[in-house]
Amino acid sequence: MTANVYRAGEDTLLLAETLERLGPFRGLAGEIGCGSGLVTEVLASLAEEVVASDVMIEAVRATWFRVKRKKLDWKVHAVCCDRFEALREGEVFGLIAFNPPYLPVEGEDVTYSGGPTGVEVPLSFAESAARRLSERGFIVLLLSSLSDWRRALEALAGAGFRVSVLCSRGVGLFEELLVILASRSAPSSARARDPDPDGETVEVPVSH
């Protein structure tokens, strides 16, 4: 694996573990920004078919070789493109997952620069995913408490998704990793769980 490929860390592991708890999945699943391929491997073990994309050809190769070693390549399609922009739009996917760049910095390494507030890149991933999601499909993504994550949830709710925090995990002294569920079957109001430093969760409204 080349140095430029995003390696699986605590964030990728948390997303993978959450998907394992949610699965199995019917139909086609996808991952945007497949990196080293861990999440794609998990999806391939849980779904009928998987499409994985990354803007870096090195990451696409790493993902392909990983699923091939696991003998899952027969149901994985690895594509080098920006998000899912090379794929046709429509109700294609039942599930799309991604661990996007989420730190509030810009103009640095594309593997972690999420934009000025840390949600610009994640929301661009979500926008590309939404245009290819089935009527009852859902998105699972990871965000950081260091970003303006509440604004991201508000944007998703405003786009018609029901949003919630599935789980969170502390990393270091000041950061929480948040796994977000955005479901197509949205009621008139949506709520999100606000991670508490003591491990409790409280409900906070997400405005539309």
Image (cartoon, rainbow, N blue to C red):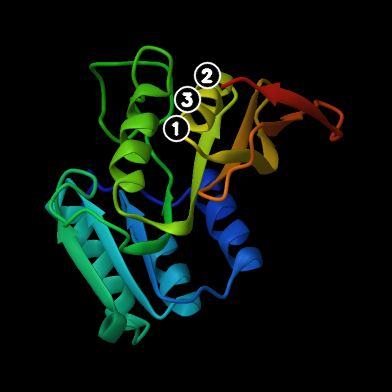
Image height check: is 77 above or below 114?
below
- At 41% across and 70% down in the image, what residue appears? 41
The one nearer the camera, 38 or 150, is 150
**Quadrant of image for the C terminus:** top right
The one nearer the camera, 46 or 159, is 159
User: x%, y% of residue 120?
Assistant: 35, 22
The one nearer the camera, 170 or 186, is 186
> How far separated are the C-alphas under marks 3 and 2?
6 Å
User: x%, y% of residue 38?
Assistant: 42, 62
Image height check: is 64 above or below 165?
below
CB contact under 8 Å: marks 2 and 1 = no
Where disc 2 sits, the SS reads helix
Nearer to us of marks 3 and 2 is 3
Q: Residue furthest front?
A: 188
Location of mark 3 (residue) = 155
- At 21% across and 52% down in the image, what residue appears? 2
Location of mark 1 (residue) = 159
User: x%, y% of residue 99?
Assistant: 43, 44
Residue type, numbered disc 1 = Ala
Where residue 151 is drawn, which disc sits there? 2
User: x%, y% of residue 127?
Assistant: 33, 37
**Quadrant of image for the N terminus:** bottom left
Image height check: is 77 above or below 192?
below
> How far separated are the C-alphas under marks 2 and 1?
12 Å
Residue 87 picture quarter: bottom left
Q: Earlier in the sequence, mark 2 or mark 1?
A: 2
Q: Is residue 193 visible?
A: yes
Relative placement, left or right, of 54 versus 102 is left
CB contact under 8 Å: marks 3 and 1 = yes
CB contact under 8 Å: marks 3 and 2 = yes
Residue type, numbered disc 3 = Ala
